[in-house]
């Protein structure tokens, strides 16, 4: 996963100390299918995830990450879930925790493909194909697909 430049700059100042970041999960739908990507670092199937850049609107970050990672143009339609991940400790010792904002987005154009180095595959998955997701990612997808008009609130476990 590519580390944004602003995080690299922060890490030069704070080392491996805990870093609190804002992240997004983009649950993109096309008809009854959900966009999934297979992460290059863990090989796990997930919806598109990413970090909100400084000053960026979170819904815009979800759309940007979807285009950057999977080549899909999608429009945010609803904030579905707000949660906090467990602390993540990366292989290099960096410690991070995320406020995770899960958005539902609607497909507008494009065919899924791994558009950058963060994923090795991208595809549409039908309702019966979501068992490849971890329980946490399934909860995020379910909140986006089946939630009401308002966002749900709750702790989200480690996104990996």
Image (tube, rainbow, N blue to C red):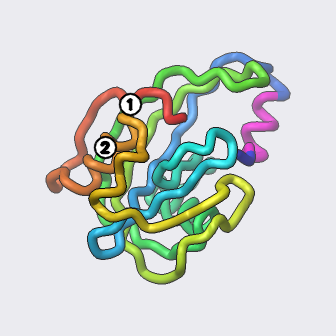
- In three-dimensional space, the C-alpha distance between marks 1 and 2, rounded to whole angstroms, equals 9 Å
Residue furthest to the left in view is 148
In percent of the image, x 38 and y 48: which residue is there?
102
Q: Nearer the viewer, residue 46 or 8?
A: 46
Quadrant (top left, top right, bottom left, bottom right) of the N terminus: top right
The residue beneath circle 2 is 81
Tell me if 26 is positioned left or right of 92 in this view.
left
| Residue 28 placement (x, y as % from top left) | 40, 64
Is-magenta flag for residue 117? no
Above or below: residue 91 compared with residue 39: above
In percent of the image, x 46 and y 34: which residue is there?
99
Q: Which residues are magenta?
A: 3-11
Residue furthest to the bottom in view is 109
Above or below: residue 85 compared with residue 146: above
Is-magenta flag for residue 10? yes
Quadrant (top left, top right, bottom left, bottom right) of the C terminus: top right
Task: Please identify the quarter of the rendering in which residue 117 is found.
Answer: bottom right
| Residue 157 placement (x, y as % from top left) | 42, 27
Residues at circles 1 and 2 in contact by the CB criterion of under 8 Å: yes
In percent of the image, x 61 and y 26: which residue is there?
96
Please tell me which of labels 1 and 2 falls first in the chain.
2
Above or below: residue 151 compared with residue 70: above
Query: For residue 156, which numbered disc appears in the image?
Result: 1
């Amino acid at each position: 996963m590519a580390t944004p430049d602003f995080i690299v700059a922060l890490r030069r100042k704070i080392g491996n100390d805990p870093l609190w970041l804002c992240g997004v999960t983009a649950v993109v739908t096309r008809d009854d299918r959900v966009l999934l990507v297979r992460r290059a670092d863990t090989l796990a199937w997930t919806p598109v995830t990413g970090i909100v850049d400084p000053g960026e609107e979170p819904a815009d970050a979800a759309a940007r990450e979807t285009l950057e990672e999977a080549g899909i143009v999608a429009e945010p339609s609803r904030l579905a879930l707000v949660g906090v991940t467990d602390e993540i400790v990366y292989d290099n010792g960096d410690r991070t925790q995320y406020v995770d904002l899960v958005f539902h987005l609607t497909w507008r154009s494009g065919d899924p493909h791994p558009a950058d180095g963060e994923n090795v595959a991208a595809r549409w998955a039908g309702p019966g194909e979501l068992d490849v997701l971890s329980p946490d990612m399934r909860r995020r997808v379910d909140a986006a697909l089946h939630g009401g008009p308002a966002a749900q609130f709750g702790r989200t476990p480690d996104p990996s």
